[in-house]
Image (tube, coloured by chain):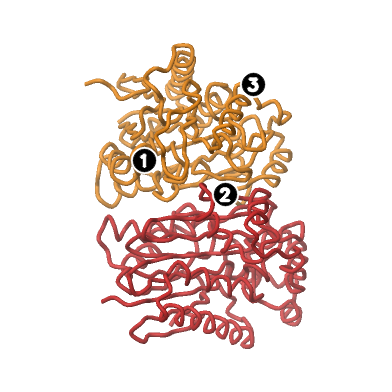
Amino acid sequence: MGGWAIAVHGGAGVDPNLPQQRQKEAKQLLTRCLNLGISALSSNIPAIDVVELVVRELETDPLFNSGRGSALTEKGTVEMEASIMDGPKRRCGAVSGVTTVKNPVSLARLVMEKSPHSYIAFSGAEEFARQQGVELVANDYFITEENVGMLKMAKEANSILFDYRIPVIGLETCSAGAAAMDNSLQMNGLPIRVYAPETVGCVAVDSQGRCAAATSTGGLMNKMTGRIGDSPLIGAGTYACNLCGISCTGEGEAIIRGTLAREVAAVMEYKGLGLQEAVDYVINERLDEGKAGLIAVSAKGEVACRFNTNGMFRGCATEDGLMEVAIWEQ
Amino acid sequence: MGWAIAIHGGAGDIPLSLPPERRLPREATLRRCLQIGVAALQAQKHSLDVVELVVRELENCPHYNAGKGSVLTTAGTVEMEASIMEGKTKRCGAVSGLSTVVNPISLARLVMEKTPHIYLAFDGAEAFAREQGVETVDPSDFVTSENIERLKQAKEANRVQIDYTQPITEERSGIPTPDGNSRIGTVGCVVVDEHGNLASATSTGGLVNKRVGRIGDTPVIGAGTYANNLCAVSATGKGEAIIRGTVARDVAALMEYKGLSVKEAAAYVIHECVPRGNAGLVAVSAKGEVAMPFNTTGMFRACATEDGYEEIAIWPLQD
């Protein structure tokens, strides 16, 4: 055993009717990010740097719901959150309510390394960002036209929507608006076609067996301002220790309740399960009625992805040559 | 079997020389809160109502670092946080960054019951408080002269202080605190009622001289607070250590996955998983057992069980 491994995700819960073009773009982005991570791992870059690097790339691309492309709050603004954790010493950092920081995951890393705290939020996090001199942009930078349209629809439907990946135009052509939301496939109580994958994440183990995890998100479409989900919560959306690294996505509230990321590590640590067994157990037994997915790597260089949603944008690779990018159940 | 309740008022480096004028009012508060909880349990109140009731009482008391006694941020303001969790359903609610809400724990409960979310923070949480019509006061009402002095001392010492005004430079320095007699801490309550329903609640003002926006372990489900159908846990101490140790969930995980008793699981987490001097917790099991371990000098704590056991203590008990 041994060797590096990496997995990335762009959210769990995908509309089965997602246009082919959109699927293709998502796979291309996942492949690009995976390759970025692979080349970093091959150059012996530590896992903690690799997960940050890959998540920055996902944040910078507007396709998924994090950084640029983040879902909008009920006020039409962006409030992003992220966390990162380094397995060997279980050091961690998290941010919430970030509105001008181009790469929230890097701010989370700075909280971990440059502050005595683990978690800083809202105006305090913005102030910390300025002190640290990270790249700042106007809130508008994060707001895409597509998301503005989706917020409008969400408000019309008077519901809180997870992010989605259906172009507004596409939706209109296939009977738009609230009427279109009558669909049997649901996620978080919402029709899947307007739900959508939220969150991006990356987990990696380097060739020295160090695990790390990072997760970043814009949260829910039409969310109340101030809402915090699972992504910044250590043990819920993100966890890493000397055994494994995990990043979760899906219904935030179910993930928080299930302390899902820590759970994978806990059953490995306390029940002696292997990575795949642990991941299967957690997805099958620990989600109650909730819908979610996760990616995980072990210190031994194994990788696992599981979800009980309709699809998850994901990709994984290991040193011994496995490489896979997928959306649907295989 | 039967009901059980445990309460804490924070763990930390509480000197054995704590003068009576500091010690007695805190012990009296613990006793009073314990009695309130016991009376509620005897009156068949649900565990969730009992933990909220008791933590509200602790928040209303200026001697502990939550609600009215909250310590100040580096900007001289109050930013309170709290969370609550019900064991049977694992429903939970949390709030951070409150500056006007008299009882943060009740707002956490409203987040749990009245929103599709679990966790609201800062302006959004304050706006939700207005919507729900909970009692609010001017932010300056939380600022006590004692806490202004505490912040002043912390700033002079140029350090962020833990709940207990313990010096926490990068690692623990062991330097005597400049404010050795002002020991105050996070509060929490865990309960199992006679039907075996478990609940946990934790509330805090955070750290003296903390950075504005800092979130500790208290509102983080699995870190400061956790409850399921086996046990309910509320942790206190150095937030960053409790977050990375997912302390509250780990007590439950050890019971669930290794079959440990609540006492064994709680002791394992406090003595094996968290660095010495960092944390304490209170826990009750569905069977009505209680555990209150800490690896700090002391922890303000109290517990009672249906079969008549009662304890109110600060330092380790003499055998």
Front one among B168 and A30 = B168
* Residue at the image point whose x is 55% and y is 38% from the top: B82
- Labels in figure, total: 3
Q: Is residue A25 left or right of residue A100?
A: left
Determine the CA span between mark 3 and mark 2: 34 Å
Q: With respect to residue A57, does B81 lie above or below?
A: above
- Quick one: label 1 or label 3, which is nearer the N terminus? 3
Identified by mark 3, the residue type is: Ser
Q: Name the secondary structure under disc 2.
A: loop
Identified by mark 1, the residue type is: Cys
Camera-nearest label, 3 or 2? 3
The percent position of residue B12, horizontal first and vertical second, equals 42, 31
Q: With respect to residue A96, does B72 lie above or below?
A: above
Crowding around mark 2 (Cα neighbors within 10 Å: few <14, some 14 to 19, many 20+) is many
Residue under numbered circle 2: B118
The percent position of residue B6, horizontal first and vertical second, equals 39, 28
Give the drawing colour for chain B. Answer: orange
Residue under numbered circle 3: B145
Front one among A85 and B161 = B161
Give the drawing colour for chain A. Answer: red
The percent position of residue A156, horizontal first and vertical second, equals 77, 63
Q: With respect to residue A53, does B90 lie above or below?
A: above
Residue A162 marker? none
Residue under numbered circle 1: B231
Identified by mark 2, the residue type is: Ile
- Quick one: label 3 or label 2, which is nearer the N terminus? 2
Q: In this view, does A135 lie to the left or right of A43?
A: right
The subunit carrying tag 3 is B
Determine the CA span between mark 2 and mark 1: 20 Å
Q: With respect to residue B141, does A120 lie above or below?
A: below
